[in-house]
Image (cartoon, helix red, strand yellow):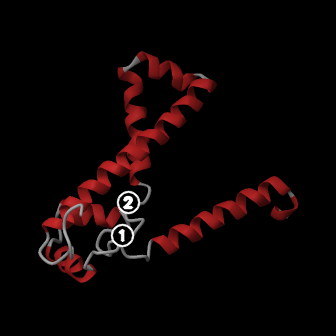
Amino acid sequence: NLFKVPELKEKILFTLLCLLIYRIGAHIATPGVNVQALQDFVKNSQGTLFALYDLFAGGGFSRATVFALGIMPYISASIVFQLAGPVFPVIEKMQRDEEGRKRLTQWTRYLTVALCLFQAYGFALFTEQLPGAVAHAGLG
C-alpha cells in the first residue's frame, strides 16, 4: 500500500496539494484585465505564435489567469542550462558531478524566477496594447 510508507505518503500529499493550488490559480483571472477582449483577440489570431504559446500554456493566456505562465519558464531555464553544457566546460563539469547538479538545479530555479518576471512583464505590455483589454494601463 502506498500510504504505509510515511515519506512516500508525504510526497504524494504534497504533490496533490500543489496540483490543487495550481488548478485553482489556473481559474483566477488577473485583476484589471478584460478577459472577453483577450479571448476575442485570441479567436482572431488563430495560427499565430501567440495562439501556439497559449496552447502550450493550457489556455491560460486567453483567460488571463494568475498562473498563465505555467511551467514554461522552468522548462526554458532547464533547456538553457542543458544547452550551455557543451558550450561552457564549467557547466559541463557541473552536470557530471553530484554536487554540481545540485548547484545547477539551484541556478535553474533562479533563472526560472528571472524568466517569470521577464515574461510577465512582456505579457503585461502585450495586453496593454490590446484595445479594451486593460482598464487602467500603466504602473499607477
Element carrying mark 1: loop
User: For the point 36% across and 69% down, which residue is it?
Assistant: 60
The correct choice, above or below, for 104 with respect to 9 in the image is: above
Q: Which residue is mark 1?
A: 60
Q: Position of residue 129 (x, y in %)?
A: 13, 66
Q: Position of residue 85 (x, y in %)?
A: 42, 25
- Residue at the right extreme of this rendering: 4
Query: Which amino acid type is marked by label 2?
Result: Leu
Asked whether the beta carbons under mark 1 and mark 2 sit within 8 Å of each other, the answer is yes
The correct choice, above or below, for 102 with respect to 140 in the image is: above
In the shown orientation, is residue 54 left or right of residue 138? Answer: right
The correct choice, above or below, for 10 with respect to 89 in the image is: below
Of the image marks 1 and 2, the number of the one nearer the N terminus? 1
Quarter of the image holding residue 6? bottom right
Q: Which residue is mark 2?
A: 69
In the shown orientation, is residue 72 left or right of residue 129? Answer: right
Question: Are there few (<14), some (14-19), or many (20+) residues within 10 Å of tag 2?
Answer: many
